[in-house]
Amino acid sequence: MKKRNPYLFAILPLYIFTFLFILGPIIYMVVISFLTNHGSLGYSWDFTFANYIKLFDKVYFRTFTKSLSIAFFSTLLTIIIGYPFGFWMSGLSAKGRKLMMLSLVLPFGINSLIRLYGWIIILQSKGILNNVLLSLHIIKEPLKILYSYPAVLIGMVYALLPFMIFSIYSSAVKLDLSLLDAARDLGANRVITFLTVSFPLTLPGLFAGIILTFVPSMGLFFIADILGGNKVVLVGSLIQDQMTRGSNWPFAAAIAVALTLITSVLLYFNKIISAKDGGQ
Amino acid sequence: MRKKYKFPYFYLAFISILMYLPFLVVVVFSFNESKLPTIFTNFSFKWYKELFYNKRLLESLLNSFLLGIFSTLASAVIGTIGAVGLAKTHYKLNKPVSYIATLPMMIPEIILAMVFLAFFSLLSLPFGFVTLLIAHTAFCVPYILIMVSSTINTLDKELEEAARDLGASRRRAFIDIILPLLFPSILSGSILAFAMSLDDVVISVFVNSPYFVTLPVRVYTQLKTGVTPEINALCTIMLIICLIGITIYYILSNKKEKHKHD
Amino acid sequence: MIKKISVVLLLTILLLTFTSCNKAEKDQLVLYTWEGMFPREVLEGFTKQTGIEIIYSTFDLNETMLEKLSTANGTSTYDLVIGDDYIIDAVIKRGLAQKLDKTQIPSFGNINPIYQGYFYDETNEYTVPYGAGIPMIVYNPDEIDFDIDSYQDLWDPRLKDSIAITANYRLVNGITLMSMGKGLNETDIPTIKAAGEKLLLLADNIRLVQDDNTQLSLLNGEAKVALLYTSQVTSVLAENPNLKAVFPSEGLGIGIMDFFIPKDAKNAKAAHRFLEYILQPQVAADCFNYLGYFCTTKAADDLVNPNLVFKGEFKGEIMQNVPEDADEQYNKNWIEFKTALN
């Protein structure tokens, strides 16, 4: 006798919501990418592959590689900075953890765009960073950091760090301290304990963090616009351009579909790797 | 915490300060006399005064909070029980559905905005709070789903089985055992979702109505005419509200902890 | 407990849904444009005079507005819209605007004719101009020791890494074409490609590309020369009167913003009343002084900031929409150019 799985009701809301409000619009997006554009008159229902063929043009293709490189480096930096943060944060006392989490949350209360303007004030030639470095005589002339690739990286890492930290933290906070004590009792030193016990157990958090960092970074073009002075062209800026003065929604949709596919493929690899290593 | 080494504390403090720098700058500049967002001239309260006259801006602040709370709640519920359900059932559609549900995070906002607009028009939904709520929930669900799913597999299955053996119903086991264990992930995901909702402008501009405008929309649509420190003043006030809310939460939850121990 | 909370939440959602639906008891005008297009006093003055409440709705990009108007079936949420010239071209071509009833706008003659009759509304039946922009070159004479008076000057190697330009791909391509003696609405592909090559040579001189608040870079020293929109010029000259602003000698580009009324606007009557109001000399002057764009209401020319009244003969072109293949080449030029920057 087969009993109906009682968890059916748990996934029903997700199923319904997904099919209705997520799948629907997405199918629409895919459909648009195959239509023909007519400039200011909009697009017509003539199916074509032209938009996808255009993607392979050297000019557009390069934006994809550029975006991937920025996403990759931003994610790498957030892991380097964020992993220790999340890990050590989980080791604080209960009060300390709460305090830290709340203090991480607070900056979200300000609009991200405004915070970026804050970075301009800090990084500009007559800005805070340069003033400090100059007065400490570390440099002789102001650094022209603003409107460059490094500035974009700083902005990206700043925006994405909380995501990584939260992910690592959620995983690390559930570490069973008795496991660590057991390892130490068995003679392992601090480093080895970390590498063989703590780190593997926090991998799920790390992989979640990678997803939550890498994926959005492909789209955060406004950071490249504001801090990079629009000199770093990302896929997101391309799409924005195409959808605005370019007035070419089918092409923009094609770019978006391509972006989604690439991101999905990378996520798939991420999942495979995490299943192997995280190995539950 | 390994009390011998102080370095972790320094690291946490250092990075936290760095994270706070831009927003400290924003707060300081809200007192800037000049209209320019990047050059400080004189100290002045003038923008705070402007803010009080700007009823629309304050109204949109309230709208943003309301929208954020409701879409976070909705996505937290759908996402959490969805994640639990996905882990406990083995339907063939589970994998595709979980993939599709995370797609909104991968698709550039402007595209999402465009398709939501077209799709909602197709369904003749009333534009305004309803469409905003749906759209925001749609892009918030992935955050909750990813966070909760990643920790659900590490839950000790034996705990749940033990509870069931002791006679607890499935519902009880869920509420008393699983939910508390998932709480950190749900909270983390919810905070991220709330932040995303508060910040969203592109999607909101497309699916809103003239009667329900959110704050980021007001801010971003000023770009053609120039951002003034009035926004800084508003952000500072938002911060103060958040700070008060967080402090209250902190005090209350500490009291509860003490209560538990007594 | 959970049940109680759910009920409360549900009620709140229902309440919010209903309050955000149309509150059409009072006489309302739904205005749709960028944020900050009118001084507060002007809007309040209208309500005081007519009793009509203004619901100020905003968009960030012209294309957003176009899309929202296109998907409205039957009735339009918006009564009066302000957009850029090129987008109004698309709006009218798609049949989304209605002809103005000039009997309701007796002051229509207050408009300065040099801002009318362009490609998007040659017969002036659909639009009322509200502000015009002519991009100019502004530079800091303290940092630059020679005179700049043409687009060609921007290519001068002495200006390495010191120019800020706006992020408008047509404009940037346009100034390149004008420096080559061509027009900015060029449609010949080889010519556009040649412009692209010349544009690449400019890359070294560019410090940053930014569409909004470009003028700030002149004020905080990040850039020494800038290509600015009119409102940015007005704002930057107010902050630093030492800066020099020039109309480049090869020719000018112009962009005009206009009011139009969507086809199925609910309250077209209120829209017409607002148009009549905005064309009053003093009201117009207040608006343009606030906005910083060229005054398009001739009757207000004496009352407004003199920098905002265009003097002399206008030798220039308005930026028009071009055929797709030309547009694509312009786009490619732009992306190649941006990629070459750093």
Image (cartoon, helix red, strand yellow):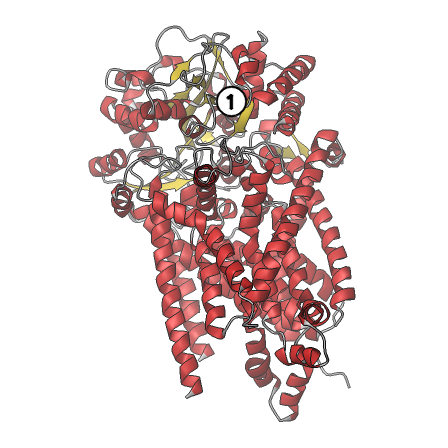
Q: As drawn, is B162 to the left or to the right of B14?
A: right
Front-most of C40 and C149? C149
Q: Is residue B72 above or below residue B37?
A: below
Can residue C17 be seen here? Answer: no
Q: Which residue corresponds to the image point at 44% horizontal and 85% vertical from the top-left?
A: B260
- From the top left corner, tell me how far across and down residue C17 is, in percent: 42, 58
- From the top left corner, tell me how far across and down residue A98 is, in percent: 47, 69
The C terminus of chain C: image quadrant: top right
- From the top left corner, tell me how far across and down residue C208 is, in percent: 53, 28
Tell me the quarter of the picture where residue A18 sits: bottom right
Q: Is residue C149 above or below residue B169?
A: above
- From the top left corner, tell me how far across and down residue A183 is, in percent: 70, 78
In this rendering, the count of numbered labels is 1
Q: Which residue corresponds to the image point at 28% horizontal and 21% vertical from the top-left?
A: C107
In the rendered structure, the residue with mark 1 lies on which chain? C
Q: As drawn, is C78 to the left or to the right of C241?
A: right
Tell me the quarter of the picture where residue A235 sits: top right
Q: Label 1's element? A: strand
Q: Amino acid at mark 1?
A: Ile
Front-most of C29 and B241? B241
Tell me the quarter of the picture where residue A16 sits: bottom right
Task: Tell me the residue that label 1 is attached to.
Answer: C163
